[in-house]
Image (spheres, rainbow, N blue to C red):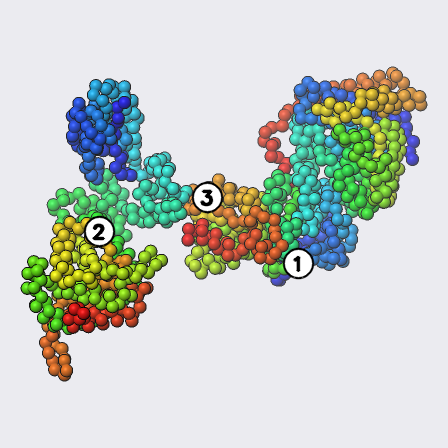
Amino acid sequence: MANYTSEQKINMLYDMMLIRGFEETVEKLFQDGKIHGTMHLCIGQEATAVGACAALTREDKITSNHRGHGHSIAKGTEVKGMMAELLGKETGYCKGKGGSMHIADLNVGNLGANGIVAAGLPLGTGAALASKMKNEGYVVLCFFGDGSTNEGAFHEALNLASVWDLPMVFFCENNLYGMSGSIKEMVNVEHISERAKAYGIPGVTINGNDVLEVAKTTEEAVARARKGEGPTLIEAETYRWRGHSRSDARKYRSRDEEKDWRKNRDPIARFKLQLIEENVLTEEKFAELEERMEKDLAEAVQFAEESPEPSLDTLTADIYA
Amino acid sequence: MMVREITYADAIREAMSQRMRADDDVFILGEDIGIYGGAFGVTNGMIEEFGPERVRITPISEAAISGCAVGAAMMGMRPILEIQFSDFVMIAMDNIVNQAAKMRYMFGGKAQVPTVIRLPGGSGAGFAAQHSQSLEAWMAHVPGLIVVQPSNAYDAKGLMKTAINNNNPVLFYEHKLLYNSKGDVPEEEYEIPLGVAEVKREGTDLTVVATGVMVHRTLEAAKELEKEGISIEVIDPRTLVPLDTETIIESIKKTNRALVVYEAVERGGYGAEIASMIGESDAFDFLDAPVSRLGGVATPIPYNPKLEKAAVPQVENIIAKVKSVMNK
Amino acid sequence: MAEKVVMPKLGATMEEGTIDSWLVDVGEEIEEGDPIVEIQTDKITMEVEAEADGVLLKKLYEAGDTIPVQQVIAYIGEAGENVDDLVDDASSVDKTEAVTPDAKVDTPAEVTATGAGDSDTTEIRRTPIARRLAAENNIDLREITGSGPLGRIQKVDVENAIAQNKQKITPLAKKMAVDQQVDTTSITGSGAYGKIVKDDIIAANRPKEVAAADERVAFKGIRKVIADRISDSYYSAPHVTLHSEIDMTECVKLRKQLLPIIEEAEGVRVSYNEIIVKATAFSLRQNPNINISLENEKEIVYHSDIHIGFAVAVPDGLVVPVLRNVDQKGLGILTKEAKTIAKKARDGMLTPDEMQGSTFTISNLGMFAVDGFTPIINQPNAAILGVGRIQEKPVIINGQVEARSMMTLSLSFDHRIIDGAPAAQFLTDLKNVLEQPYKLMV
């Protein structure tokens, strides 16, 4: 297992900061009426996205879900193109036709966010099968939430990946709620990772707010996959600070619970403290990172705002190849 | 070209095999397609030639294997997915409708999904309600999907090559009753372009646009009608999306009458789309009778053979309908 | 409130009418149904009747004025009622409508280009191709009867109309026709394939008296009715005609003896016709399977009564008055009835009742030099008897040549419902009774 260099650790921290900054920025833009539709923010879950992607190469692939901004940024997708996409601009990753739930960047192995719960898993099996058949060596990591694990597609995909020994990692971000449904009320196993047993693959539950633990666990799973030993199910426990989407009053959970996760289990604060303790980071360096992040995001917003709208004649473009 | 008489099933198998020999990215996956040869024997012998890597027997998991086909296509493979009965595609609908059909568009043109989904459809074999449907209209409704429906061995082979080489998801509707029907098919590979209908029979009094097995029933009806002095032209669109509207319109301009015959439930079937296309087209000014449809009865397909026959158009129904449009 | 009197639309193609003369003056009292004004169209002259009681308040046009149909031409109301406001409305309508008839006088090319020829035919049920063909060929759909479902005009109907209307004309002839205001629709072309050429226009434009014109009479009225009935019968009932030569010598004797008796009793002279009618009724009673009719091609009706129609020639055709219950009447009464009804027929005074209800018909051409013929059944009868002249002929009786009064009867019957043998039996029975007429006494 690799020990991460200081630089790698700082980069991981920066990515986590950028994800949160991105989410806070788009939240504000939404409130200002500059972004329409809806969005699903991953504030509080930065460590799962960054930790998991830290274990992947650029050639490895991810599939994502509706709460996908963090996964995209962690996989290397640029915030400029993402911001432009959220503003529906022609320069967006999807030329303004996908929006928040469909950001994809095949160049960095980001096979796309997905508006259908658990849909990324069967798609991931196909990508993994292609890797195997074409002998390309890449691994496919599927991000999904706790709620997805009650979809048939989850079970079918795990089984298929298992019987075919596909190079995959099934990465479940268990943030305790599928929209409003508490996972405790929706499944009768203590840990989602136990479900792996049914498909004859390893399953492990980890602290999803500890980015290094996430990275290390994922690395082991990726190594196994690359060796042709098949998929692993990782359950990373985390918490989304915001509601499910923009229209969620969060009546299904207590403010005390939210406060506990925010105050005591903030993945960024935790990692920052850890790096300061390790003497990898200083407050000055952190302030520099914040400044850089703000600049990056300001540039992204400016780029997005100044970009043109897609023309009407693109309405029916790209339906068929 | 070396032409032999082979079955519709043989033609499909031959097209797939020839493509697989020529292109390593092409493979087939599906349930029981190995030593069993698939539910209708279409993949007989393929696993022996290509091995289990490229003739992939899957678990009974339509949701997974359809997504798998789409994901693999997205990553550069050209998978052919055999859905055992077209009815089972319901379980794979998300991957076809929400994923495959939309991926390219919603990713801003950055992905493509070259996959063929083979769907044995239609009634007449006694399989009852859950194994006999003709739901091609559902697929034709979805932008991003290509829908083909070959009616004979020659078309099946040519369209299969076209489908495999196409960079979009192609729903390939096969008909159970046609698998054993024989036709002259060249040994060599050839393509039939999408969106090119074929006039299967020329006539002067009425144009029948028929799909799938209805092409054969209509041709039979045409022989009977000819004895009574009614000459019908029979057009098989062969591909529903894209649809060759021009051939249909030009024919109707000549005959002045149009009837669309399809096996699917008449209400909301793809024939209704063809009929309304005709009504809105240049052919309107040439119509001498209302554009009519003859489709299946709005009922689940029953098991009893007599009832099953009554549920979808038969030769005598086509004859009667033609006469009624002809006001005879 | 004043009632309008409008120029009535008297036919599908009528667009305007001319006031011939006013029959009522302003201020004059009118009752509903009174004729107010006489108008003239290109086809007829007719009176417009009042649709309300009242006083003629105002005339909007004078005799000689031509007015579009549906246009108000007068008002009827209560004496003293003011209609000036209404008149303004009517004349403002006049302005807009007055344009319409002129605009209709299009050349065919303009009609095609604008589709104006179709503007008034939107309520006519027709297929798109029929509409298109009609517009292209300047055919008025209102003139066509549709053969399709619900009377829909179809392509074939328009094609037939085109075939009838199609006139080929050379450009020169066309120009001449326009210049000289010659209506080409009534001209039959003398060029190749009936093309109208210069000479046809010249011929058509010659003063009428110079041309040796055939008389042309509209095929309508009683002639049309007869024609329809005759052809209906001829084409629906398979006719078979049997002939039989009758020795009328005994009948001739009988008539001679009865003549003065009947003349004295009834004041009419009995003719062979009545004797044959009576004998026929007698034979029909013996052969009820001839006294039948086919109703609506559904039921065969065996009539209990014997009513015999007999054809009477009238100036413009043929009528068939009916003698009722012939079998129950004596020859005297029968003769009187026959003479009376025949006269009414010739005078055109027959009521419809007197021409209905026959169960069998006789057509007698004995007054002409006709021996036998094949009469057409007078449906719904199943049979008709044709009667030829009576002529003395040499006949061999017991090896001796004798002069006998001979006559040929021809029985046409509807072979759908009468077989050959019963028909032959009937004719044989009739022959027997005519040759031994005293049988009528039995």
Residue placed furthest toward the front = C442
Neighbour class for label 1 at 10 Å: few (<14), some, many (≥20)?
many
The chain carrying label 2 is C
Residue pictured at 13% horizontal, 51% vertical: C347
Residue tagged 1: B10
At mark 2, the secondary structure is helix
In this image, B325 relative to C245: left or right? right
Mark 3 chain? B
Tell me how far mark 2 sits from mark 1, CA to CA: 80 Å
User: Depth check: C344 or A175 in front?
Assistant: C344
Q: Label 3 belongs to which residue?
A: B283
C368 vs A215, left or right, is: left
Observer-side mark, 2 or 3, equals 2
Occupied quadrant, residue C139:
top left
Same chain for the residues at labels 3 and 1, yes or no?
yes
Q: Residue at x 54, y 43 (%)?
A: B273
Image coordinates of residue A115 in percent, x first then y, are: 71, 33
Q: Secondary structure at mark 3?
A: helix
- Whichever of labels 3 and 1 marks the residue nearer the N terminus, that label is 1
Q: Are marks 2 and 3 on the same chain?
A: no
Distance CA(mark 2)–CA(mark 3): 55 Å
